[in-house]
Image (spheres, grey):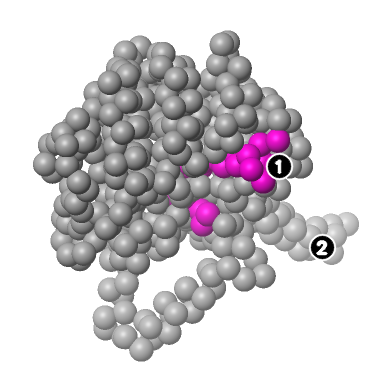
């Protein structure tokens, strides 16, 4: 029953030589369309919110679409902030769907209840966009505590609307959920929690969905600030380190993706983006368009222990 | 020794096996097996452990199983209810001994 044992081994020393580099082919082009959001969730690593103004502009989006084809990615993963609030979101989504069979949008759900974003539900369904929805619990209390009063009820209403157009029911309309712990603790086993989510959401609200992705809170951004402010930072990092699982290393998401920031800067993942740690070469999306893909050395930090603790963690859930 | 209870000692619990490794190994193997998924879920076992921890009033166990319950996805409401189960049994155990008192009173009073 170890709690908070800290060894402070640099993360990079835990990684074997092969896993320090990206794979021979990248699969996911992750696009962070900006920091603007209708919510200000307490655990948001991007510190997104209504007061933020950073948004991705078309030249970056156009370059990303070209790079997608040049490097042979198979997935475009669109995130934010609330990506829907980027003024060029609909244009980009349309262009992405023309060249990519697997487009993911990470939505906070609540935005889809606000005008004019409510119209996007039909657009998503028409283009068979995979939706990955933040719903940090199947109970209202932890959701409202983390994301704001009334957000659980609004999210439930949108999920019912998504089910009504076929999401989570029609096999071509994939609806996934994301669980984040509502505090400085870890997540339950993904399979166990998925079963609970499915039972509770079905029984209470009649909601169906495909998969639950369990994501460990990364000690950066707003969640990192919470840890520092409450004196939990050292013990949380210590617990992450104590739970290190080397079997998760080959499946770390940074090995298979490229994360694009709103201004065209490039990162190994969204968490490095939050920590302002660009790829080691410092190249931008515009630079990469001029060269062929070569595996790149990944930039690690102590926060990377969040992706290798226990069952592992990624934007697609557990990795072990 | 500044205090009998030091939070850092919890992380060193495994070292208790150093002076008696055979017994230590048997205990920790057993301990791990008890808390594995079984007929009861790991979350249910963690809630039981939390309730028992409050009964035996072990600060190490309360710390460890508060963390563990949260890690297993238990809510504060579930954890509080679990503690009330321990409280009810503990209080009830005292109260039911009142039957002894009643029996003695009955025997002695005119």
Q: Quadrant of residue A58?
A: top left
Q: What x and y, as percent, mark residue A279?
A: 18, 41
**Which quadrant is the C terminus of chain A positioned in?**
bottom left
Any mark on residue A61, and which? none
Magenta residue check for A171: yes
Magenta residue check for A227: no
Q: Residue at x 63, y 39 (%)?
A: A173
Residue for badge 2: B103
Q: What x and y, as percent, mark residue B77?
A: 60, 40
**Which quadrant is the N terminus of chain A positioned in?**
bottom left
Q: Residue at x 76, y 37 (%)?
A: A206
Q: Quadrant of residue A220?
A: top left
Report the mark closest to the observer, 2 or 1. Answer: 1
Q: Are marks 2 and 1 in contact (CB under 8 Å)?
A: no
The answer to which of B81 and A275 lies nearer the viewer is A275
Specify whether residue B79 is in view.
no
Left or right of A13 in this view: B105: right
| Chain of the residue under label 2 | B
Q: Residue at x 24, y 23 (%)?
A: A263
Q: Dominant secondary structure of the magenta stretch? A: loop
The answer to which of A281 and B9 lies nearer the viewer is A281
Give above or below for A315 relative to A223.
Answer: below
Under circle 2, the secondary element is: helix
Q: Residue at x 54, y 70 (%)?
A: B36
Report the span colored magenta: A166-190
Give above or below for A9 relative to B22.
Answer: above
Left or right of A307 in this view: A194: right
The answer to which of A248 and A129 lies nearer the viewer is A129
Residue furthest to the right? B110
Q: What x and y, as percent, mark residue A229?
A: 28, 30
Give above or below for A279 relative to B6.
Answer: above
């Amino acid at each position: 029953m170890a709690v908070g044992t800290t060894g402070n081994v640099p993360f990079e020393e835990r990684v074997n030589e092969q896993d320090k580099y990206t794979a021979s082919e990248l699969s996911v082009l992750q696009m962070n369309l900006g920091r603007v959001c209708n919510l200000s969730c307490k655990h948001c690593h991007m510190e997104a919110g209504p007061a933020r103004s950073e948004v991705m502009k078309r030249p970056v989006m156009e370059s990303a679409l070209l790079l997608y084809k040049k490097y042979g990615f198979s997935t475009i993963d669109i995130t934010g902030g609330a990506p829907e609030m980027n003024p060029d979101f609909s244009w980009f989504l349309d262009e992405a769907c023309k060249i990519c069979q697997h487009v993911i949008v990470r939505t906070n759900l609540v935005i889809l209840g606000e005008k004019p974003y409510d119209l996007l539900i039909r657009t998503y369904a028409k283009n068979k966009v995979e939706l990955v929805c933040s719903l940090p619990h199947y109970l209202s209390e932890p959701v409202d505590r983390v994301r704001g009063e009334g957000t659980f009820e609004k999210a439930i209403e949108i999920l019912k609307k998504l089910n009504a157009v076929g999401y989570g029911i029609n096999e071509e309309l994939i609806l996934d959920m994301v669980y984040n712990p509502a505090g400085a603790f870890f997540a339950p086993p993904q399979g166990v929690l998925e079963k609970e989510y499915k039972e509770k959401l079905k029984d209470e609200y009649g909601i169906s969905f495909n998969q639950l992705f369990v994501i460990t809170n990364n000690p950066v951004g707003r969640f990192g600030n919470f840890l520092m402010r409450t004196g939990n930072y050292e013990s949380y990092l210590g617990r992450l380190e104590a739970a290190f699982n080397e079997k998760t290393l080959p499946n770390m998401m940074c090995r298979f993706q490229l994360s694009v920031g709103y201004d065209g800067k490039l990162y190994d993942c969204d968490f490095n983006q939050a920590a302002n740690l660009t790829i080691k070469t410092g190249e931008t999306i515009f630079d990469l368009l001029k060269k062929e893909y070569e595996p790149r050395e990944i930039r690690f930090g102590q926060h990377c222990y969040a992706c290798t603790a226990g069952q592992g963690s990624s934007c697609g859930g557990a990795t072990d | 020794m500044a205090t009998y209870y030091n939070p850092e000692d919890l992380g060193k619990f495994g070292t208790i096996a150093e002076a008696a490794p055979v017994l230590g190994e048997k205990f920790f193997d057993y301990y791990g097996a008890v808390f594995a998924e079984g007929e009861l879920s790991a979350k249910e076992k963690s809630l039981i452990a939390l309730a028992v921890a409050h009964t035996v009033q072990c600060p190490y166990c309360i710390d460890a199983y508060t963390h563990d319950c949260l890690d297993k996805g238990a809510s504060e409401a579930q954890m509080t209810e679990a503690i009330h189960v321990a409280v009810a049994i503990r209080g009830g155990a005292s109260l039911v001994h009142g039957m002894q008192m009643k029996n003695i009173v009955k025997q002695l009073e005119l």
